[in-house]
Image (spheres, rainbow, N blue to C red):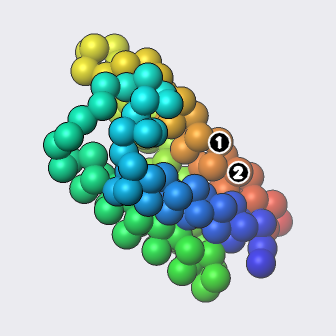
Amino acid sequence: MCNSAKSVWYFGLYILVLGLTLVVTPNLLLTLVNLPVTAEVWIRVVGMLLIFLSVYYLYFARHPHPAFFRLTVYNRAAVILFFLVFVLLELAAPVLLMFAVVDLAGATWTWVALKGEES
């Protein structure tokens, strides 16, 4: 597996675990990151979406497609911009940025790996 595929594979595993946690025990995660607990279904829907998204990451990591990898870089890098706006507008707690940093780190890893594979 090439380095860009590895980066996508590990990110896929990360969002799979995050999604499963949000579906099965969402308040455990929310409590750990000091966010308000909820009994509403929306948090489980987000978990379900993360699980579904992880399928794409895990599939394409096994069947490399550089165009998909590049798209993930842009999307994952954009997460920090959205989360920063949410925090600045006081729609979310600053702890949300912790998740955005993970996305940005994963995007950076994939971007660097793609650059190395192009040369």
Is there any visible trace of residue 114 in the rendered image?
no
Is 90 located above or below residue 86 in the figure?
A: above
- Residue at 62% x, 75% y is 61
Q: Position of residue 41 (x, y in %)?
A: 18, 49
- Residue at 25% x, 56% y is 45
Q: State the residue position of label 2.
A: 109
Is 94 located above or below residue 42 in the figure?
A: above
The local secondary structure at tag 1 comes to helix
Q: Position of residue 72 (x, y in %)?
A: 50, 59
In the image shown, does 63 or 51 lie closer to the viewer? 51
Is there any visible trace of residue 38 in the rendered image?
yes
- Residue at 43% x, 29% y is 31
From the viewer's perspective, is 37 left or right of 25? left
Q: State the residue position of label 1.
A: 105
Structural crowding at the residue carrying mark 1, measured as other residues with C-alpha within 10 Å and reported as few (<14), some (14–19) or many (≥20) = some
Q: Position of residue 35 (x, y in %)?
A: 37, 25
Quadrant of image for the C terminus? bottom right
- Residue at 65% x, 42% y is 105
| Marks 2 and 1 close (CB-CB < 8 Å) | yes
